[in-house]
Image (spheres, coloured by chain):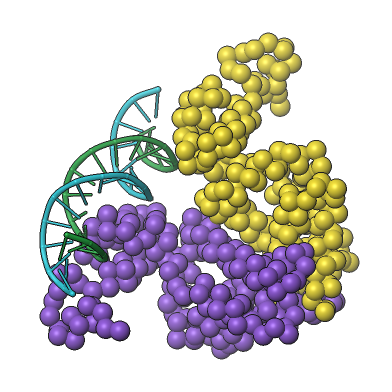
Chain colours: A purple, B yellow, C cyan, D green
Amino acid sequence: MMTVADIVGRIGRVARWEPDARGRLAEAALELYAERGYEQTTVADIAGRAGLTERTFFRHYADKREVLFGGPMPELVEAALREAPAGEGALAVGRLAMLAAAGALPPERRPFARKRQAVIDATPALQERELLKLDSFARLIDRALTARGEEPAVSRIVAETSVALFKVAFAAWIDGDGGNDLTTLTEGAFVALGRVSAG
Amino acid sequence: MMTVADIVGRIGRVARWEPDARGRLAEAALELYAERGYEQTTVADIAGRAGLTERTFFRHYADKREVLFGGPMPELVEAALREAPAGEGALAVGRLAMLAAAGALPPERRPFARKRQAVIDATPALQERELLKLDSFARLIDRALTARGEEPAVSRIVAETSVALFKVAFAAWIDGDGGNDLTTLTEGAFVALGRVSAG
DNA sequence: GTCTATAGGGCGATAGAC
DNA sequence: GTCTATCGCCCTATAGAC
């Protein structure tokens, strides 16, 4: 279905507002956080660079941290959990969920992800938010596994472990040379768990 | 060396200040967060109940969240990692570190821990802080394992997995009926990992 | 202790599209 | 008329600076 914004875009006329306020805010925020640091950046700075006001920033993002965490990963994880084949074991389902998350970060997004991660690594407040997002994936997996009839104890362990492995794979993807994509590294982390927990 | 507080304690007289301002602030904060919610509680409220000023609160705690996270767990984890026998495998060391963390919460602390956890579970801002604290344990384990000569990939996986298992055990301790102590539950989580990752 | 900047929420006004 | 995105000005509490 064609939206008003689409029509405006086609006609090529400037409407009342520049399009994609949300995206412009996110871009401006990352730039400024990288340039001068998260704490040294005010919401007014971000809004100003995006050609908007402070108040509009808070319409699009609940707080100053959230502007870096707007990706499609939660939906991808939920979809993977919904579509996981009935026969799969618990850990295999957790693995599918994390592979879906990895799918949100194809190789071409690595430069952006590295820039974003450098900002997060320099800022405890952003690390906290990142950990909460990852924890929410664990909750999704736990709920899905329980719904599939797994023991609560198994669901929880698999959920937390799966996310732990994704964290490891993601860190390796960011720190590495780009030779392996995130999907491969995620699969590798699940394989490595078997080795570590056996040996 | 003897501090002023020590001297006051010995004499047994009430000096210029009631003793243990830090503890009183923590107690007042938990009460208020439980009574009316974290966001509905101001730092002035907490300080007032503790008979202190707002400014004094920030001398003892860096921010409003930190007042719930002042325990000895980090030191216990560090000590366990320092004293881990040389022969132990990576996962065994992670397990020792998490058992040391569990040691900070003996059965008699469960009522307090449950009250505190209820507040945290109701407050995303506090969940974020809790996750950051747990993540800092993973960093400690990772560093210690790397120092012991483990492969970086193994260190990271073991570190994240160990903390993941502790999270599961802690949740079970809080949610359960108190029949199992946290140490037992933590050991059980490490045992269960073997079953889950094998089967 | 005092002062101040900033985060972030409430609410109403405005200006288009339909 | 309704709906939606933006702006403006109010406010309080946090947290850092002095």
Identify which residue, D14 or C1, lies in the foreground.
D14
Quadrant for the N terminus of chain B, please. Answer: top right
- Residue at the far bottom in the pictured view: A179
The percent position of residue B129, horizontal first and vertical second, equals: 57, 51
Identify which residue, A93 or A66, lies in the foreground.
A93
Quadrant for the C terminus of chain B, please. Answer: bottom right
Is B147 drawn above or below residue A76 in the view shown? above
Q: In which quarter of the image is residue A147?
A: bottom right
Q: In which quarter of the image is residue B3?
A: top right
Is A84 drawn above or below residue A145 in the view shown? below
The percent position of residue B75, horizontal first and vertical second, equals: 72, 47
Q: In this view, does A176 lie to the left or right of B181?
A: left
Q: In this view, does B101 lie to the left or right of A131?
A: right
Residue at 52% of width from left, 78% of height from top? A76
Residue at 67% of width from left, 85% of height from top? A85
Residue at 68% of width from left, 61% of height from top? B138
Residue at 80% of width from left, 62% of height from top? B189
Does residue B45 appear anywhere in the picture? yes
The percent position of residue B79, horizontal first and vertical second, equals: 77, 51
Does residue B22 appear anywhere in the picture? no
Is A28 drawn above or below residue A96 in the view shown? above
Q: In this view, does B10 lie to the left or right of C10?
A: right
